[in-house]
Image (cartoon, rainbow, N blue to C red):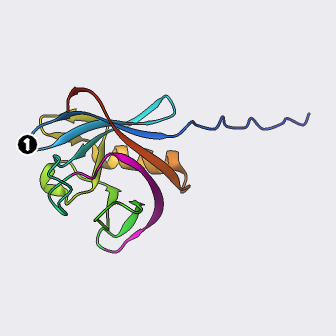
Amino acid sequence: MFRIPEVEKPLQGMRLIRDDQDDIRTLGTMFYGEERLCETLELPWRDNYRGISCIPEGAYECRIGHSPFRGYPVYWLQDVPGRSDVQIHIGNFPKDIRGCILVGTERGTDMVVHSKIAFNKFMERMGGKDFTLEITKGGGSV
């Protein structure tokens, strides 16, 4: 009997909700629709200075592309005001960031853990498709 393949329900959009920030790091959670994808780690807000600050809140187109520096595909955030080369990539600690977004399966003290696992799941979930990421503040100490 012929079976119609089940069509995957489209997800409602990507959101990164920042909910914990201090002078060392910014922690958040990334969602795709209502699905929690991963925890995130960014630098603290330092007036959008390149290499030492997280990026401004807002909506950013994210496109997949190869990172020559990292040697693997990453998502690149487009048109970040005053910035370039902002990526979503693997890393665990604030020292691993120069203004990008790191992903992990859970949070530790001033870090995310199991970044490679979270990144691989994130990349698989995105399936190489471009998306818009909305970055906002949530509840907590941001």
Q: Nearer the viewer, residue 85 or 1?
A: 85
Instruction: From the viewer's perspective, tell me whether residue 29 is left or right of residue 51.
Output: right
Q: Is residue 122 left or right of residue 80?
A: right
The residue lying furthest to the bottom in this view is: 68
Q: Residue furthest right?
A: 1
Q: Is residue 67 magenta?
A: yes
Q: Compared to 52, does 28 lie above or below?
A: above
Residue under the image location 32 percent in, 67 percent down: 85
Q: Position of residue 132 (x, y in %)?
A: 49, 50
Queried whether the magenta region covers residue 7, the answer comes back as no
Residue type beneath disc 1: Asp
**Closest to the observer, 37 or 53:** 53
User: Residue drawn 32% across and 61% down?
Assistant: 81
Q: Give the prevailing secondary structure in the magenta stretch.
A: strand
Q: Residues within 10 Å of mark 1 (few under 14, many from 20)?
A: few
Q: Quadrant of residue 28?
A: top left
Above or below, 65 against 90 in this view is below
Q: Which residues are magenta?
A: 54-68
Residue drawn at (53%, 56%) of the image:
130
Please name the residue that numbered disc 1 is placed on.
Answer: 23
Name the residue furthest left: 23
Q: Quadrant of the N terminus?
A: top right
What is the secondary structure assignment of the residue under circle 1? loop
